[in-house]
Amino acid sequence: MRYQVPRGTHDVLPGDVHRWHRLEADFREFVSRYGYEEIRTPMFEDTDLFLRTAGDTSDIVTKQMYSFEDKGGRNITLKPEGTAPAMRALIEHNLCPPGTIARLYYVSPFFRYERPMKGRYRQLHQVGLELVGSKSPLADAEVIEISAKFYESLKIPGVTVLLNSLGRDECRAKYQEAILEFAEPVLRDQGEEMRAKALKNPLRLLDSKDEAMVEAMKSAPSILNFLEEDSKAEFEQLQQLLTDAHVTFEVRPEIVRGLDYYTGTVFEVQSNKLGTANALCGGGRYDKLIKELGGADTPSVGVGMGIERALIVLEEEGLSWPAPRPDAFVAYTGIDTQAQALDTARSMRNSGMSVVVDPEGRSLKAQLRQADKLGARYVVLIGEDEVAKNVVSVRILDTGDQREMALAQLLTLAAEAP
Ligand code: HAM
């Protein structure tokens, strides 16, 4: 039997992994400029953590969790998202005592049993961040600005933020009533499951996949007409801050997000290169989650950015980064020159070069072919002649130029190489 990668997952192969390294490194560097620090949490948590936070009407909780009982009888779930685990850790280690601010980021796989398609996987990867401890619209603006500017820094074109506010509890409650009433004629013809879900969380109606409901929701009342004065003022301030930061955005009242913990601002960045699963990232404010998990009342806002989705768009735009090449391939002519070749390679590595040597002692022709295939910058040739003269022959593969030099000189070149 030939085994294959599990459905909905993918291998990241050597020819591609540099793109992951680059995106992750760029993200770390980018967010550290704003003062974010990395947090790493385990791949699994108590199932209850996600039941409490993602919400029992969310697709994640109802359909997508990889949950199992471990050998100790504990109910465990592979983490489907990063916010709840990060907040669990924040409370456990008291990372944000009252009156302080914490800025956390993570780079992590997550696990969701979804129907796989382009840009949608069962093991997905995100870079994400959480700004904890501020209820100011400046915090929302910071997180949204980082999201938009990070994509800009990657040169992903046409980045637009879709923005909405879910307001405070009071206005959300009024809105939920209104939208239920509005949807009632369509809901009447729906199955029991959908009706129950809608009754429990009427906001779900806005991201229903049911055709009749999608159609009906096009003329649904807007939540923005239900915002009370404070929420309205904060939402306006946020928009002004984003305008000042030159972040392009569109207000889209239909953006409600698929997780139940959001309060106030919600946003997504979408790309038309992605088809149905078109969100490059999504996030928002979750002012109640930390208290829900037993911590102090701590307002927070954050975002999760899909790594695969950013890489797909970069690839489709022809914006990929070049694969790294080894600096040199040290080729040798036979058993008599092998020790010298290995020694030369070692010295070169000590001065910081990446150097490949053929372990098989194949013909010089075969070694040169390998060097070419790997895209090495130089071939360093060690034959009997070179050993006798205590030099190396260096061929620059891009130009074909070849000259002899002392090893010391080669090492100086290595130090000067870009
Ligand atoms: P989310 O919208 O579920 O939010 O996921 C964030 C991003 O992860 C999506 O916009 C998408 O780019 C990517 N993503 C989600 N599911 C998949 C999948 N199956 N395959 C590939 N990519 C996927 C969250 O996870 C929240 N924790 C974000 C957040 C952080 N909110 C506040 N702080």
Image (cartoon, rainbow, N blue to C red):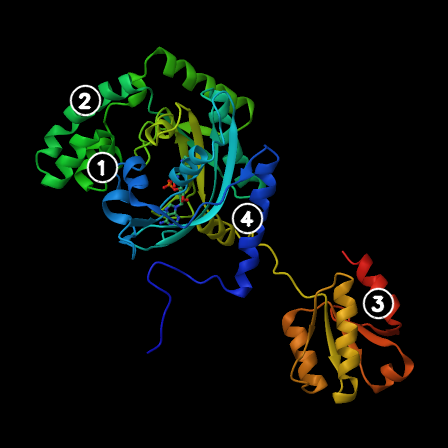
In three-dimensional space, the C-alpha distance between marks 2 and 4, rounded to whole angstroms, equals 43 Å
Which residue appears farthest toward the top when viewing the image? 229
Residue linked to disc 2:
177
Mark toward the viewer: 2 or 4: 4
Q: Which residue lies at the image location 45% right of the left edge and 51% below the top edge?
A: 308
Please tell me which of labels 2 and 4 falls first in the chain.
4
Disc 3 residue lies near ligand 1 with CB under 8 A:
no
Q: CA distance from mark 1 to mark 3?
A: 67 Å
Q: Which mark is residue 410?
A: 3
Image position of 218 (left or right of 26): left
Residue occupying the point 46% across, 26% down: 140
For marks 3 and 4 on the same chain, the one whose residue lies earlier in the sequence: 4
Marks 3 and 4, Cα distance to the nearest angstrom? 33 Å
Where does residue 303 sit, x and y in percent of width and height?
44, 36
Left or right: where 352 falls relative to 134: right
Query: For the residues carrying marks 2 and 1, which lies nearer the camera in this image?
Result: 2
Vertically, is 262 above or below 365? Answer: above
Number of the label disc, if any, that sits on residue 24: 4
Q: Are marks 1 and 4 in contact (CB under 8 Å)?
A: no
Marks 1, 3: nearer the viewer:
3
Answer above or below: position of 387 versus 237.
below
| Ligand 1 visible in quadrant | top left
Residue ID for mark 1: 214
Q: Which of the two labelled residues, at mark 1 and mark 4, occupies the earlier sequence position? A: 4
* Badge 3 vs badge 4, beta-carbon distance below 8 Å: no
| Numbered disc 4: secondary structure | helix
